[in-house]
Amino acid sequence: MGATSPKPAKKRSSRLTQPIVPAALYQEVADRLREEIFDHVLQPGEWIDELALVARYGISRTPLREALKVLAAEGLVTLKPRRGSYVAEISKEDAAEIYPVLAMLEGRCAYEATRRLSDVAASQLQSCHDALEQAAAAGEIRQFFEVNQEFHRLVQGQAANRWLIQIINDLRKVLKLSRLNSLSRVGRLGSSLAEHRLILAAMLDRDAEGAEAAMRAHLLAGQHAIQKQLDEGAPRERNNT
């Protein structure tokens, strides 16, 4: 057989030849803007004053605009041609579509977490729930909210399914745009606590299907409370569910 001609060398992407550098400035700007959106320093629906942010952050408009593109891709900012950027708003329709999906995903997390629940994780969940009981008894809505978030993080961590966790976190980012807090609705704090008791009991009994059903019901109950507030035109709160 005759000698074969050598294969031409593959061209390397210019990006591959660039040196690795620390996080770009626009990423830091995106992190700060994201935090301000979640804390409602920048309110849902608010026009984003780029000139004011440039002055406040001490940066040029280029990294700010790159950061806004990142947040737009996350669904936290809306870019309108010739009008600028706005903090995204979550509508009643958005909530109606997101909560059932979130309930399904978090239910699956509870299922997987229960199937692999260790004694250490069970103890952590019990301790977290005890803190929920204390916050509820004291009527501390803000504390209850924070501990509630930690409980869900513990369940997700025990599930150890990075794909589930990633999607759940993305959906929760969007829900943080809501200025409504279901826990402020009369009776919701007690109902949420009762729902957590059912979730924990199923998990400690290693009842994966029961834990999944209880978690899904918990998320859908939260959706129902939010929808009631939207229907009634309730005052908007600064804390989210």
Image (tube, helix red, strand yellow):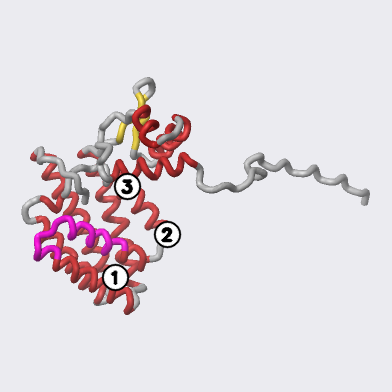
Quick one: label 3, few (<14), some, or many (20+) residues within 10 Å?
some
> Can you tell which mark lies on residue 124?
none
Q: Residue furthest left?
A: 186
Q: Amino acid at mark 3?
A: Lys
Of tags 2 and 1, the one toward the viewer is 2
Q: Residue at x 20, y 39 (%)?
A: 92
Which residue is tagged 1? Answer: 208
Which residue is tagged 3? Answer: 173
Of label 3 and label 1, which has the lower sequence position? Answer: 3
State the image coordinates of residue 125 (x, y, percent, origin top left): 26, 71
Which residue is tagged 2? Answer: 162
Q: Residue at x 9, y 60 (%)?
A: 139
Horizontal arrangement in the rendering, residue 232 relative to residue 22 (left or right): left
Horizontal arrangement in the rendering, residue 193 relative to residue 97 (left or right): left
Quick one: label 1, few (<14), some, or many (20+) residues within 10 Å?
many
Q: Give the residues in magenta.
A: 135-153
Marks 3 and 2 in Cβ contact (< 8 Å): no
